[in-house]
């Protein structure tokens, strides 16, 4: 069963859609938004990076960015990694500062943080 199906069976209908260069995640409970996150490919200084923001909070040059992730090839491990800079990502998703994660580690932490947030809702 997918994560989205798990959420829906627990009473949290989820919508994930792509609009241009933006991935929008919306999770509801009782008809109200319980969690939202926009992920957009950055430009300018953030070119090639993913920018994370609350719903509608990042316009590409201003807004409320809460984290960014820069993909890179890690020669030591021989594979791709993400350099994640946390500016209070998802209420303390990683803590402060920069961490280097595999995509699997990143998505595992993101999913755990979403579930934690919804359990408090």
Image (cartoon, helix red, strand yellow):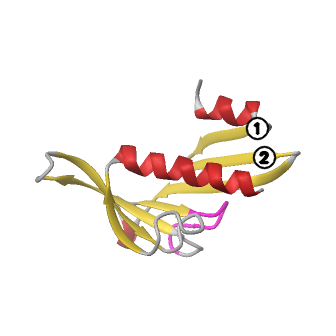
Query: How busy is the neighbourhood of tag 1: few (under 14 within 10 Å), some, or many (20 plus)?
Result: some
- Is 79 situated above or below 99? above
Q: Is residue 49 magenta?
A: no
- Which residues are the magenta region? 53-61
Query: How busy is the neighbourhood of tag 2: few (under 14 within 10 Å), some, or many (20 plus)?
Result: some
Between 45 and 33, the one nearer to me in the picture:
33
Q: Residue at x 51, y 52 (%)?
A: 110
Residue 22 visible here: no
Residue 90: x, y in percent?
A: 58, 63
| The residue positioned farthest toward the right in the image shown | 30
The N terminus appears in which quarter of the rendering?
Answer: top right
Residue 38: x, y in percent?
A: 59, 56
Q: Cβ–Cβ below 8 Å for labels 2 and 1?
A: yes
Q: Give the CA separation, mark 2 to mark 1.
A: 5 Å
Left or right of 38: which side holds 94?
left
Q: Which mark is residue 28?
A: 2
- Is 41 situated above or below 61? above
Tell me the chief SS of the magenta region.
Answer: loop
Q: Is residue 54 magenta?
A: yes
Between 18 and 81, the one nearer to me in the picture:
81
Residue 58 visible here: yes
Q: Which residue is mark 1?
A: 13
- SS category of the residue bearing label 1: loop
Quadrant housing residue 35: bottom right
- SS category of the residue bearing label 2: strand
Residue 77: x, y in percent?
A: 15, 49
Q: Residue at x 47, y 71 (%)?
A: 95
| The residue positioned farthest toward the top in the image shown | 1
Residue 119: x, y in percent?
A: 72, 51
Q: Earlier in the sequence, mark 2 or mark 1?
A: 1
Q: Residue at x 71, y 52 (%)?
A: 118
């Amino acid at each position: 069963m997918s994560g989205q199906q798990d959420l829906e069976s627990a009473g949290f209908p989820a919508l994930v859609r792509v609009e241009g260069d933006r991935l929008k995640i919306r999770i509801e409970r009782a008809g109200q938004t319980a969690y939202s996150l926009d992920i957009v490919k950055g430009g300018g200084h953030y070119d090639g990076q993913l920018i994370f923001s609350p719903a509608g909070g990042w316009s590409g040059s201003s807004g409320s960015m809460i984290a960014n992730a820069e993909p890179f090839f890690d020669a030591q491990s021989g594979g791709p990694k993400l350099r994640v800079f946390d500016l209070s990502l998802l209420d303390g998703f990683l803590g402060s500062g920069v961490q280097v994660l595999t995509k699997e580690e990143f998505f595992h932490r993101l999913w755990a943080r979403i579930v934690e947030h919804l359990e408090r809702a």
